Image (spheres, coloured by chain):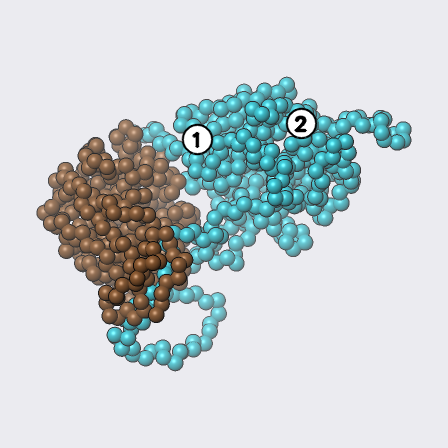
Amino acid sequence: MDVDTPAQPAHESPPAQEPSAPEIPPQIKSEPPQPKPGPNYKMKYSMSGHTMSISSLKFSPNGSILASSGADKIIKLWNTHTGEVMRTLVGHTEGISDIAWSNDGDYLASASDDKTIRIWDMTVGTEIKTLLGHTNFVFCLNYHPNSNLLVSGGFDETVRVWDVARAKALKVLPAHSDPVTSVAFSHDGTLIVSCAMDGLIRIWDADSGQCLKTLVDDDNPICSHVKFSPNSKFVLASTQDSTIRLWNYHTSRCVKTYTGHTNRTYCIFACFTNTAAKYVVSGSEDTKIYIWDLQTRQNLQTLEGHRDVVLAVATHPTKPIIASASMEKDLTIRLWYDDDYTP
Amino acid sequence: MNESLISPFNITHPTTVQTSLFALASFARFDPTGRYVATGRVDGTATIWDLDTRAAIRILDGHVKGVSSLDWSRRSRYLLTASKDWNVVVWDLASPCIPAQRCMTLRFDAPVISASFHPRNSRIILALMTTGEAYLVDQRKAHRCRVELCEMQDDSDEEGAGTSTRVRSAITVARFDPSGKHIFLGTSRGHILVFNARTKTVVARHRITGAGAIKGLEFTKTGRQLVSNSTDRTLRQFTVPTYQPPSVDGAYVEMELEPTHRFNDPINKTAWHAMCYSPDGEWLAGGAADAANHKIYIWDMSNDGQFASALDGGREPLLHLHWHPSKSSIASTTNQGNILIWHCPHPERWGAFAGGFEELDENVEYEEREDEFDIEDEADMIRRKMKEEEEEVDIDTVPEAAKPREVQHHGVTAGDEDIAWADEDPDEDLQNWRMRVIMEEDWDM
């Protein structure tokens, strides 16, 4: 029997505790690590304000503000600690699919079905730039760690890299053969990952725009969301076969699979928690939010309460807080806090 | 992070021009992070360019005469510009003011031809005047001083009649070594004087036979090698000796330095405008003072200084060049003020567009594994995959190779007194400072 050595991360339970009887699926043979005090997220705030489906949620880099966007063409900013609405940004002429904060927290970018990307100055709360170029709906976007570049993808099947300050497209990558559903920079800004409805995940050299790698799963399901791990050694990819996979893109191997949720139709976000306890969090079409242990891949907690598909989830940059938002029949944004969490 | 996916074998010296910046500049220098390039202009302004967007992001207007040199602090927060208007101006790039405001001005009593920060503390500045005097200015409270660095007039203790006629030679180059322990001064009479930065006393005096006036000095990142440029149109590489701590009685080492390599153009005998080592010290680039061509010569220092290649940058003659602090990239300045950014392009690998596809240089006979096409029981397969996924993954630790490493400087020991002196009263050039992204005004809207 494998009993863990004491050289474990600090969040493990004390070594004195007895290993409990295995309550795990029978197909796992080896003994799991000592039981951790699992996540215990509870809903703290339920906020409403959007009038149509909420498409994206993002915490500001310091975690004090939660931004939300929706099909109702507006962006709302919420105070993370009180749940109060702080500001509403109006300007897009069609629904918004995604938003992204610049890493310094000064700007927010939004991608819309009106084929534009707009940059909002967070210090004054007004729109200061419109990036024109996409020939169809803009679906996803993310900032470069230096906040000077922005990468976006859309239904015109391209990935574009923008000089934000000059509102100019620097690169147009004919990246995919179907709408691009997600795109992001690595933590050092040298790589871009993109995925599309063609089921491919591609890694690009940010500087030259060359394709460096393509990851593809056996049965090619539509890939709906992708992001780099904090150290950029892995990518977390959600596919519409109700599976989330963690890929080692160097070896092109899937190292973890997370299942249990339902994802067949929508592009649902997945994220890592940023606390010492590592979880993978995703929304689901069964109106729940799933939390898996990063290593054991077990579903540790399911958050229930939403009354429609949970599209957007976001994790706080430092604290054990999860934000989630739901579609048409619900229209609430919920903030879940894990108050029992001890690092 | 991208290095691991790009084949490591073709990373070499730059070969082609990637982009050209219309800067009207007389020289260009990369910053230590490699994100920016700063250019100095004859009209007294300096410009900072973002290499990601290739756009001018800051214009520093602080001089009434041409900018003669500039230097970055070690984490790029501070920038120094020296000018022929007798001033050295220090800029704080973390300041949110637009247009950028100077944070300090040092005034000298002659035009300044070069100035640089101490590599460990931007409050210590070395400046060189066109009149051939070098000053070390310390702005720190406890050490505040302005010292002229000059050769000691010690003809009394030397024997022979010839020495009494020795006149003070003008200083033509002043540089800190990469550790900041020593200051190297080149003179118009072909000497290199080495000063201790803390005590400001001479520790060594080297004669470079046949060199004439020293025009330039450049170090490798470790400070182990030094290359000099001089009026005899030859670049000389030296191995830097290890200097003893300065003695109390002011004695110093008088030693002739023998170059390990000499580089010159045997046919045209062109002089050199500038030279620079690659960050790993494996390549040396020399910018030829050719009046009709833009030529950069590259020597392979890991291969005994063998000539590797000559880069042709077109018709506009070269004025200056600088190698990127971490990448295979050079910024060279033309006499029309354009900055050429050279890079080493990676061949496009089309195979990367197909998943699980591997490009081979040569055909290989495919060897099938014994069980390769065996039909596996589905339950077994799931079990095997589950088993494989048991392995712990680390999603947080950044691989060591991707982090910027502290370079081990030549001649620096643990608990070095000189280093401790420089680290006293440090500047605010911290790791996590940031330059605010300024949105450009829309002209066309």
Q: Which residue is drawn at 68% across and 30% down?
A: B200
* Numbered disc 1: secondary structure: loop
Q: Tell me the number on the disc at residue B134.
A: 2
Q: Are marks 2 and 1 on the same chain?
A: yes
Amino acid bearing label 2: Ala
Furthest-front residue in this view: A16
Q: Residue at x 59, y 36 (%)?
A: B420
Front residue of B212 and A80: A80
* Numbered disc 2: secondary structure: strand
Of the chain colours in the picture, the one used for chain B is: cyan
Relative to B364, A253 lies left or right: left
Residue A38, how many percent across, how many down? 26, 54
Q: Where's the C terminus of chain B, which quadrant?
A: top left
Q: Mark 1 lies on which chain?
A: B
Tell me which chain appears brown: A
The answer to whether residue A283 shows anywhere in this view is yes
The answer to whether residue A137 shows anywhere in this view is no
Front residue of B121 and B355: B121
Q: Which chain carries label 2?
A: B
Q: Residue at x 22, y 49 (%)?
A: A41
Q: Which residue is drawn at 41% across and 58% down?
A: A7
Front residue of A292 and B165: A292
Q: Which image quadrant for residue A245?
A: bottom left
Relative to B240, B163 lies left or right: right
Relative to B254, A82 lies left or right: left
Q: Tell me the number on the disc at residue B94.
A: 1
Residue A323, how many percent across, how many down? 22, 45
Front residue of B46 and A31: A31
Amino acid bearing label 1: Ala
Residue A117, how many percent across, how many down? 27, 40
- Determine the CA span between mark 2 and mark 1: 29 Å
